[in-house]
Amino acid sequence: MERKKPLIRVRDIMRTDFGTIDGLATVDEALRQMKALKTSVLVVNKRHEDDEYGLITSGDIARHVLAKDRSPERVNVYEVMEKPTILIHPDMDIRYCSRLFARYNLVRALVVDDRQVVGIISPNTLVLDGLYRLLDIK
């Protein structure tokens, strides 16, 4: 008889500590917040109820600001952020989540429940926390 693999949901491994920023903030402000929070990603808040969340990563800043020799004090977050982003439901099996990451070459995704961001998930989290649990690695 085949042993059934345990079901690990995104909510079991997602990061729930994340920073947020307004799209009108400057990249300089985003960088300062990233440094203070020791993170490379910030959630960009919705402007209104019918808007969507965005993400800004250090990679976005490297590609759109640093590589193009633009001034972080003169570039707004909304100019370089990723929006809309692929949203993940917290109850999704991490194996399906991993397939989405592979299919769309994602670096990060927002975990959203009832239209509110409740966490962030990354390939590192999927592998280092999720796969370790599946394999029962301590």
Image: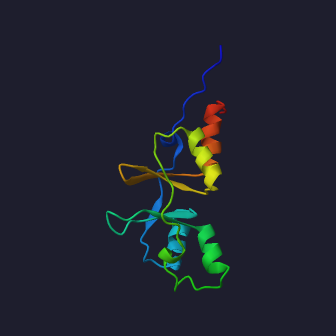
Task: Please state the horizontal and vertical placement of residue 71, each as a whole percent of the image.
Answer: 58, 86
Above/below status of 118 relative to 57: above
Q: Decide if residue 119 is on the left or right side of residue 138.
A: left
Q: Residue furthest front?
A: 103
Residue at 47 percent across and 64 percent down: it is 54
**Considering the image in quadrants, where does the C terminus appear?**
top right
Q: Decide if residue 137 is on the left or right side of residue 89.
A: right
Residue at 53 percent across and 79 percent down: it is 28
Residue closest to the eye, 23 or 12: 23
Task: Please state the horizontal and vertical placement of residue 114, each as a whole percent of the image.
Answer: 35, 49
**Considering the image in quadrants, where does the N terminus appear?**
top right
Q: Residue furthest left?
A: 49
Residue at 65 percent across and 43 percent down: it is 127
Task: Please state the horizontal and vertical placement of residue 67, each as a whole percent of the image.
Answer: 68, 79
Residue at 67 percent across and 33 percent down: it is 137
Choose top left, top right, bottom left or bottom right for residue 64: bottom right
Above/below status of 109 relative to 42: above
Task: Please state the horizontal and vertical placement of residue 38, each as a whole percent of the image.
Answer: 56, 62
Q: Residue furthest top?
A: 1
